[in-house]
Amino acid sequence: MNYAGIDVGHKTLDVVVRKKGKSLKCKSINNTVAGHAELIRYLRKHSVARVGLEATGYYHLDIAMELDNASDIDIMIINPRSSKHFANALMSKIKNDAIDAEILAKFVERMDFVTWRSPDHEVFALRACGRRLVSLTKERTKAKNQLHAFSLTKRTPTFIIEDIALTIEQLDRQIDTMVSYALEIIKQSDQLAKRYRRLISIKGVADKTAIKLLGELGVLESNMSAKQWVSHAGLFPREFQSGTSVNKRTSIGKVGNKYIREALYMGALSAAKHDPNIRGFYQHLIHDNGLIKIQATCAVMRKLLVAMHTMLKTDKPFNGQLFYTLENSPV
């Protein structure tokens, strides 16, 4: 069996094929529609059966779906963190596109292969809506901060205040419109509609959070475990401590899917206010376990994600008593 690794860039696809334990010379192909067809012809020419590429935001999806449509080629989406550890194990000291592609090819050749299957196009459309919501929300927050700053002094011209206020109003309308589009996509898919109802059964998880999570979780492999979801999201606190001189503030790790973390963070904060069981768990972590707030919030996010995995797998609504028994919560 022959293998290939593809380093996906904005403009090019760097491909390395492995035959009988040896790597062929790296081939660079344009990352275009015509280039995708050329890539498949090249892989078939060398009888490649398994291909590996990293998850790289938007750029890898089109080529991944094209390869998934090729019935004679299996594709694996590799977590960048896993490929980095693999490269370290190989003691690779040189990093460029050709080397990265070869490392991915070796990863596919030596590690357990997990076949990726493309979800329905509605899921990708919903994910795009969720990511656009993130962008619009950040723009609105920035505009609100500007409005606050300019409003602190009477010397700011009135037209500046009015202009920023107009921007905020426009962003509010765009956000509402995007939510409406996303909800319509969900309504047209029985599976998405069913999953949506399960997620909003959690107090504190409203439309925007559910939309973001449905899109991001929907593109993951269906056989992933709850533990793999947690790993994919990068939900673990980081501590910086070295002797007595270095003792930085604990923060949530930046490895993994930032969109899942962002959605869960807002959902966890809201759920800890509105759901008594989740609030009890959050307070238990702080009062009984001595965690600081960011650590407790991260733990709630992680447990919520595990609960969501079970809810979506079993098609059951959220059960607060299974999340945390209130009898054990602090008074």
Image (spheres, helix red, strand yellow):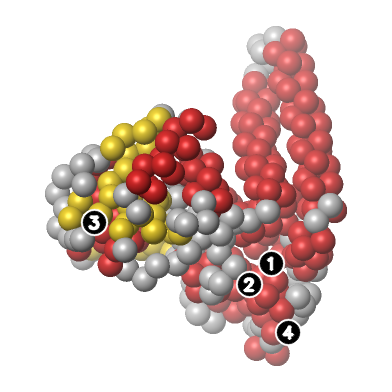
Q: Is residue 197 left or right of residue 109?
A: right
Q: Amino acid at mark 3?
A: Lys
Q: Nearer the viewer, residue 228 or 294?
A: 228
> Marks 1 and 2: in contact by CB < 8 Å?
no
Q: Quadrant of the C terminus?
A: bottom right
Q: Which residue is mark 1?
A: 272
Tag shown at residue 321: 4
Between the C-alphas of marks 4 and 1, the distance is: 14 Å
Q: Amino acid at mark 2?
A: His
Which of pointers 2 and 3 lies earlier in the amino acid sequence? 3
Identify the image quadrant of residue 325: bottom right
Identify the image quadrant of residue 94: top left
For marks 4 and 3, give the one nearer the viewer. Answer: 3
Q: Answer few, some or many: residues within 10 Å of disc 1's Cα (few below 14, many 20 plus, some between 14 and 19).
A: many
Q: Which residue is mark 3?
A: 19
Tag shown at residue 164: none
Q: Is residue 142 left or right of residue 291?
A: right
Q: Answer few, some or many: residues within 10 Å of disc 2's Cα (few below 14, many 20 plus, some between 14 and 19).
A: some
> Marks 1 and 4: in contact by CB < 8 Å?
no
Q: Amino acid at mark 4?
A: Gln
Image height check: is 142 above or below 311? above
> Marks 3 and 1: in contact by CB < 8 Å?
no
For marks 2 and 3, give the one nearer the viewer. Answer: 3
Circle 1 — which element? Answer: helix
Tag shown at residue 309: 2
